């Protein structure tokens, strides 16, 4: 919280993704973790407040990894 760039509240996700600065979507995370061989029983903790793509994108990640937990 002492780092200024972490305090950005309004993020234009399209602009961030074009610039290569935005994190992966939940769907991309699911694909990535599966490709690395993580089992579907893996626990995933979501620390972010608002997820890129919202519940629609979380549904696909949850279908791969049903053990999703939020802060």
Image: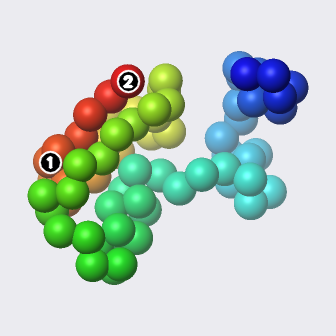
Residue drawn at x 76%, y 46% is: 15
Q: Position of residue 40 (x, y in %)?
A: 15, 62
Residue placed farthest to the front in the image? 2
Left or right: where 26 falls relative to 9:
left
| SS type, badge 1 | loop
Task: Provide the residue designation for mark 1.
Answer: 66
Q: Residues within 10 Å of mark 1 (few under 14, many from 20)?
A: some
- Disc 2 secondary structure class: loop
Q: Is residue 8 visible?
A: no
Is 58 above or below relative to 3?
A: below
Dots 1, 2 in contact, CB < 8 A: no
- Give left or right: position of 9 versus 28: right
Question: Residue visible at 53% across and 56% down?
Answer: 24
Residue position marked by numbered label 2 in the rendering: 71
Side (left or right) of 57 relative to 65: right
Q: Residues within 10 Å of mark 2 (few under 14, many from 20)?
A: few
Query: Residue 44: image x %, image y %?
Result: 30, 47
Q: Earlier in the sequence, mark 1 or mark 2?
A: 1
Say which of 30 and 60 sits in front.
30
Image coords of residue 38 (percent x, y): 26, 70
Residue 42 lies, with reference to residue 6, above or below; the image says: below
The label number, if any, that marks residue 8 in the structure image: none
Q: Quadrant of residue 17?
A: bottom right
Q: Quadrant of residue 6?
A: top right
Image quadrant in which the N terminus is located:
top right
Horizontally, residue 63 falls left or right of residue 35, namely left
Foreground pick, 29 / 60: 29
The CA distance from mark 1 to mark 2 is 16 Å
Residue 35 % position (x, y)? 33, 79
- Residue found at x 37% / y 57%: 27
């Amino acid at each position: 919280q002492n780092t200024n760039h972490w305090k950005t509240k309004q993020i234009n996700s399209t602009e961030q993704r074009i610039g290569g600065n935005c994190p992966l979507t939940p769907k991309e995370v699911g694909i990535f973790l599966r490709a690395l061989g993580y089992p579907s029983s893996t626990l995933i903790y979501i620390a972010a407040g608002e997820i890129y793509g919202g519940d629609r994108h979380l549904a696909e990640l949850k279908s791969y990894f049903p053990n999703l937990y939020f802060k």
